[in-house]
Image (spheres, helix red, strand yellow):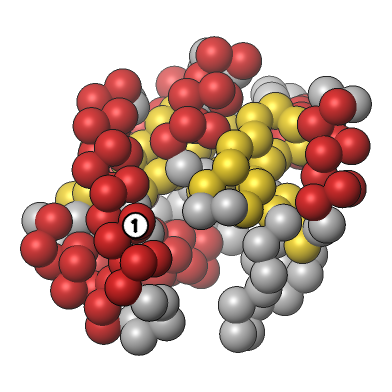
Amino acid sequence: MEKDVKKQQNNPGKLFVISGSSGVGKGTLLKELLNRNPDLKLSISATTRHPRPGEIDGVNYFFISKDEFEKSVQNGEFLEWTEFNGNCYGTKEYYVKKTLGKGENLILEIETRGALQIKKKIPEAVLIFVLPPSIEELEHRLRGRNTEDETTIQGRLHEAYREIECSSQYDFRVVNDDLNRALVELEKIINQELAKS
């Protein structure tokens, strides 16, 4: 299968918004997608949450204070923003529009509330939801990470039900039951959408 995702010359870039419940494996899927397709660029969101082990400011997220985040909200700098588990996450509008304006194709990994906000503001954005094979498998993956307490896990499972319900509003849904199969399906969707540009 063709897997080169090419930059569109003299055309604005395409925005792909990818969501999926915590533990669904979207991080691994995106890492492989970006390794195989260097012409895709991952958008970096701002967040008020603390970095997890191994996360780097300016690479995984822009880690900012609650005050700084609130000032950006008041100044209307976010294309979308949301609060989840007591932390805020947002995407700077200037960054996204500047990147797309240069003809670069951008991947935005955000949760469903933010994705639906983006779709209202940028209707041509392509929304892709990564589904777990089952809720039972999702719970197994979350527990297997050994990074969160029971309350957090239950909160993530509750959120997963809500997000899966919202996924009916997405353009595409990909089940991550097998990494390679899901990766091929994701690349196929992206290439088909880029061919329309």
Q: Residue drawn at (73%, 51%), measured in percent from left and top?
A: 46
x then y, percent, for residue 151: 35, 67
Task: Establish if 3 lies above or below 170.
Answer: below
Amino acid type of the residue that numbered disc 1 sits on in the rendered structure: Arg
Reading the image, the residue beneath label 1 is 156
- Residue 186 x/y as whole percent: 32, 48
- Decide if residue 102 is in sight here: no
Q: Is residue 177 left or right of residue 76?
A: left
Q: Which residue sits at x=67%, y=73%?
A: 51
Residue 182 is situated, as x and y percent measured from the top left of the image, at 24, 56
Q: Quadrant of residue 102?
A: top right
Horizontal side, residue 60 vs residue 78: left or right: left
**Above-or-below relation of 144 to 156:** below
Counting from the top left corner in percent of width and height, residue 161 is at 23, 43
| Residue 156 appearing in the image | yes
Q: Is residue 33 left or right of residue 45?
A: left
